[in-house]
Amino acid sequence: MRIAMIGTGYVGLVSGACFADFGHDVVCVDKDAGKIAALEAGRMPIYEPGLDTLVASNVRAGRLAFTTDLATAVSGADAVFIAVGTPSRRGDGHADLSYVFAATHEIAAAIDGPTVVVTKSTVPVGTGDEVERIIREVAPDATAWVVSNPEFLREGAAIEDFKRPDRIVIGIEDEEARGVMQEIYRPLYLNQAPLVFTGRRTSELIKYAANAFLAVKITFINEIADLCEVAGADVQQVARGIGLDNRIGSKFLHAGPGYGGSCFPKDTLALLKTADDHETPLRIVEATVKVNDARKRAMGRKVIKAMGGDVRGKTVGVLGLTFKPNTDDMRDAPSLALIQTLEDAGAKIRAFDPEGHDQARPLLPHVEFASDPYAVADGADALVLVTEWNAFRALDLKRVAGLLAHPALIDLRNVYPPEEARRAGLVYTGVGRGDGA
Ligand code: NAD
């Protein structure tokens, strides 16, 4: 199959490289010439484990190429995937579809044979209808079928997720598109990954329902963590106790500083706007968004409390800035609101992240960036663990305690057993650990 991937970001680049690895001929397109130049020079524009070798081997095999020239990539393609960004629209939280529609106009003008146009971007229910309308308007004679194929990969484990998905959701309105989509995903289908064919609108909604459900699950355990703290219980044991029930499942039950990242915040908001537009309120999702927003600053207050209530002039060391480990993505990272709250209260921040410094620097102009976790701790009045990178899982806690001016460890990911931290001489604060263990 000949595939054009429009948008070479976290989703487009991983999907394009994986499709090439399945044996398809893939051209990844981006309007960001710097990104394409970097890729042509063999440099990855993002950090994603394993991506550099996957890209290199498929480029070498002649199956993967990069360009800024959309028209040439689309011409002769069996399928054109739209994988451009759909951020929150400023002001109202709706998904900003301007990139999707701009790409659609360009694609429509370039189609020169039967083509399946696939929205891989996360788009509100009904967007496929508009994509189809634009194509019919710009290219009335084109033979094009519009399909929805939302992506469920997680940054940090993106290649594994793409190659071993729990399911592949494909929303079609035309039977002609089914064969092309089946052929594209055939290698995964052979691996038993279920292809779930639905109508296009259903497929669009599945993506938002999935992300909203996961956001609800995280927020639920975060509220239970708050209750654990005052009621003298341990949220990790509660999570294990409920997660072993197959109807609940153990994933997404880790209490922490609240969800962030490039998807959950914007997708929950966009779903609420869709619900409003259809006069069908989703009250559980509404509550989730409110609770999670409040939690981000509450984590700042938690740190301030653990430091005795006054942080003016004090230095807080922060370990981890990206919204999760194994990515350099800073979009809506919980560290941003936490650091803002601490800076508002007069604290100075020193931070380290294994991969996030380049993306974090412009967002955190007052933060001092250190070269490793121990340099962060050196002379600081407290150390806050925000993102659970592996590099922070086996710190020499005695050394950390010796370096800190005041030995406070606020572990917002519950990485360390409280007893171990206390034995090392640290005053430990976790999340939802109210049993004094
Ligand atoms: P991204 O910002 O990393 O990448 C989007 C890319 O599209 C950018 O490089 C941009 O320059 C390019 N672009 C925009 N308009 C273009 C055009 N007309 N022609 C060519 N290139 C164009 O975004 P992302 O994180 O990869 O997300 C893409 C979509 O996938 C979003 O809808 C997102 O919600 C969804 N998604 C993301 C993830 C994730 O983990 N990042 C997971 C599942 C779904």
Image (cartoon, rainbow, N blue to C red):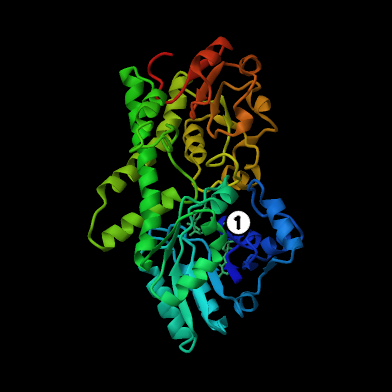
Residue 167 lies in quadrant: bottom left
Q: Which residue in the protein does label 1 denote?
A: 14
Tally of marks: 1
Q: Position of residue 233 (x, y in %)?
A: 35, 19
Q: Which quadrant of the picture is home to ligand 1?
A: bottom right
Question: Residue 294, can we see it?
Answer: no
| 80 up-or-down from 271: above or below | below
Furthest residue in direction bottom, as rendered = 141
Quadrant of the snapshot with the N terminus: bottom right
Dot 1 crowding, Cα within 10 Å, few <14, some 14–19, many 20+: many
Quadrant of the snapshot with the C terminus: top left
- Amino acid at pointer 1: Val
| 20 up-or-down from 379: above or below | below
Q: Position of residue 113 (x, y in %)?
A: 55, 84
Residue sitting nearer the eye, 364 or 28: 28
- Residue drawn where x is 63% and y is 67% of the image: 24
Q: Position of residue 143 (x, y in %)?
A: 49, 84
The secondary element bearing badge 1 is classed as helix
